[in-house]
Amino acid sequence: MILCGVRDVWDYRIQSDTEQMIITGGSAFNIKAESLRIGNFSKEEVRTLSLEHTKETGQVFTTDALNAIWDLTSGQPWLVNALAYETCFKLELGKNPDNPITDCMVEQVKENLIIRRETHLDQLADKLKEERVRRVIEPILTGDLYEGMLRADDIEYVKDLGLITQAPNGEISISNRIYQEIIPRQLSWESQSGMALKQAWFIDDDGRLNISKLIGEFQQFFREHSESWIERFQYKEAGPQILLQAFLQRIVNGGGQIDREYGLGRTRTDLYVRWPLQDGTVQRIIIELKILYKSREQTIEDGMKQVCKYADRCGADEAHIIVFDRRPEVSWDKKIFQDTRICIGSEDKMNQCSVKIWGM
């Protein structure tokens, strides 16, 4: 007999109503012989799947499109099939088999799936409400130092849900790029909806995104409203990062794109904003979010090393570091500051990048 579900059957624990706790030592369904998890596709299997479509219809996937599917999904079966099906049979350009499937089409479909909150993604969002999931995901979002705060059974549970992967060295990360976008978007959805912001306020006459004006506006917003807004979040420790991403997403939606990188134990979250310009080029902006743990200067120095390396890798011409000071005894007048520094690219690129530092 095969019982197929989202969770391992072992995770359906016995709940004691009288003691208001989970009874350890197994579950009422401790009847399994073996648990099997449907694994992800390999990169070659994603290519093989696309070739089946090509054989039937003659429509080809470009190499960049296949790389985009792999990059976005890391082989997660539902996501791979959803992207391919939507691109080939729902997207107007993709419906014509004479048109090759390109990476731009795949990126557009990815955004469509996220905005529509397909059933799979909606269920994923629902799992974020569980306390066992929060205990694992929140430190990843904040980049908090790992000090043994994660429980082994929580990690296994969230792995079984497919939300995270764990490398042989123990490093934990969110499973794929689509989940990296879905998680903060879902956690900040209500905040985005409640913000009275308009994209036109932050677009210059030449079509460039005025990110300094946007962050400056957020700095004042955070000073005035952070306590009341963060109190609404279930993920309170990640509240500053969630609030900033809600603010940014509200403006970038429908125009640009935000890529996110999280680093458990590296005390930072990296945001890479790409904003298309009227002349066909792309404005590239790096925003690094830091929580102040040491001194302000040490936090900035660490951030400069990290953001310069990231900006060099992405070819960004603008970078920002936002330092969140969570210490309740420090006044807002001391938390709020601005500074500008210059980072130099690697020897092979030698580009200079201006880095603005924002305290809040």
Image: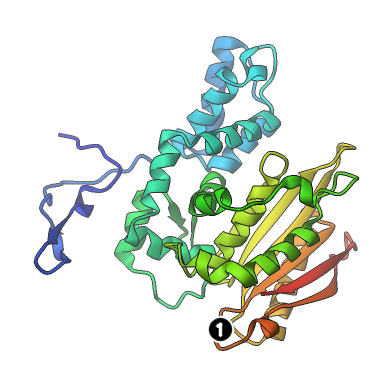
> Is the residue 302 above or below the residue 272 in the image?
below
Q: Is residue 73 visible?
A: yes
Q: Position of residue 66 (x, y in %)?
A: 62, 32
Q: Which residue is mark 1?
A: 327
Locate residue 318 relative to residue 199 in the image: left or right: right
Q: Residue at x 25, y 37 (%)?
A: 4
Q: Quadrant of the N terminus?
A: top left
Locate residue 89 relative to residue 24 in the image: left or right: right
Q: Is residue 313 visible?
A: no
The residue closer to the viewer here, 235 or 295, is: 235
The residue closer to the viewer here, 327 or 76, is: 327
Locate residue 89 relative to residue 32 in the image: left or right: right
Q: Residue at x 45, y 35 (%)?
A: 77
The residue closer to the viewer here, 248 or 118, is: 248
Q: Position of residue 314 (x, y in %)?
A: 76, 54
Q: Residue at x 46, y 34 (%)?
A: 118
> Is the residue 232 above or below the residue 101 in the image?
below
Q: Position of residue 88 (x, y in %)?
A: 58, 20
> Is the residue 105 above or below the residue 205 in the image?
above
Q: Amino acid at mark 1?
A: Arg
Q: Position of residue 74 (x, y in %)?
A: 53, 43
The residue closer to the viewer here, 117 or 137, is: 117
Helix, strand or loop status at disc 1: loop
Q: Quadrant of the C terminus?
A: bottom right
